[in-house]
Amino acid sequence: MFNLILFGPPGSGKGTQSERLIAKYGLKHLSTGDLLRSEIAAQTPLGLEAKSFMDKGQLVPDAVVIGMISSAVDANPQVQGFLFDGFPRTVAQAEALDKLLQLKNAEINVVLSLQVGEEELMKRLLNRGLTSGRSDDTNEEVIRARIVEYRNKTSVVADYYRNFDKVEEIKGEGSVDDIFNALCASIDQRI
Ligand code: B4P
């Protein structure tokens, strides 16, 4: 198995680049943001709980997200590997993911960390909010809260993987094609 994490702040291009990477490398895409939004759309109890955090720009509690990813990994036993998008977002989630993969004699092979400045993030998310219908993209205060959550709880996840020499930093500003090519070059060195 080849497992990668696409890492970065909200609006850094994780979703955008994931679509292209899974097509090229044949990986199974697991986006916790997408999984949570499907739960919200289906109005499940998990979705209703998650919505109250997402609408405020806060992270959904670890237990909820870890349970969801664990089920999704177990539901895909035959894949060549996973692309984790937007997960892990806390060190507790990273530790849980390592344990989950160990049970399958697998590991995270590389963490691709997209680097984008905060003003560019704001611009992109407000712009997406014009058309996405996502309540967490339309309000500037909520977007700022998401960036603060990233700074306080998520950026340390990169340090966790740096201890294992798994992090590659990629410039996330510029054309989608150029960023995609840089991501592929890093993957090709590790695959
Ligand atoms: P996510 O769904 O993961 O959303 P995101 O981080 O905002 O989006 P992403 O980074 O994928 O967006 P993209 O850059 O592709 O999370 C939403 C919420 O769910 C979180 O706030 C949290 O509450 C909850 N959640 C999810 N996972 C969780 C977890 N593990 N634990 C706890 N809570 C969790 O796109 C942004 C925009 O930029 C797009 O419009 C795109 O077109 C544009 N763009 C992309 N690349 C560009 C480029 N190179 N140049 C210009 N624009 C670009």
Image: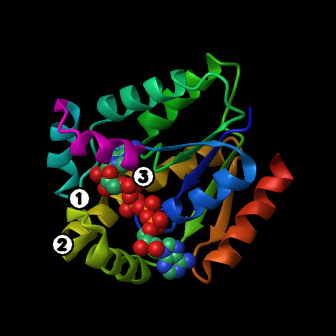
Gap between marks 1 and 2, in whole Å?
8 Å
Q: Is mark 1 within 8 Å of ligand 1?
A: yes
Q: Is residue 188 left or right of residue 38?
A: right
User: Which x, y percent locates residue 130?
Assistant: 27, 79
* Secondary structure under the numbered disc 1 in the rendered image: loop
Q: Main secondary structure of the magenta part?
A: helix
Which mark is in front, 1 or 3?
A: 1
**Ligand 1 found in image quarter:** bottom left
Gap between marks 1 and 3, in whole Å?
13 Å
> Quarter of the image containing the C terminus?
top right
Q: Is residue 57 left or right of residue 179?
A: left
Residue hosting label 3? 154
Q: Is residue 104 left or right of residue 92?
A: right
Chain-order first, disc 1 or disc 3? 1
Residue hosting label 2? 141
> Quarter of the image containing the N terminus?
top right
- On screen, residue 166 above or below 21: above
* Secondary structure under the numbered disc 3 in the rendered image: helix
- On screen, residue 120 above or below 11: below
| Residue that appears at 61% across and 83% down | 174
Q: Is residue 28 left or right of residue 60?
A: right
Residue hosting label 1? 57
| Residue that appears at 14% across and 47% down | 52
Residue 102 visible in the shown view: yes
Viewer-closest of 50 and 88: 50
Question: Start and end of the magenta stretch?
Answer: 32-45
Amino acid marked by disc 1: Gly
- On screen, residue 131 above or below 76: below
CB atoms at circles 1 and 2 under 8 Å apart? yes
User: Which x, y percent locates residue 53?
Assistant: 19, 48
Chain-order first, disc 1 or disc 2? 1
Chain-order first, disc 3 or disc 2? 2
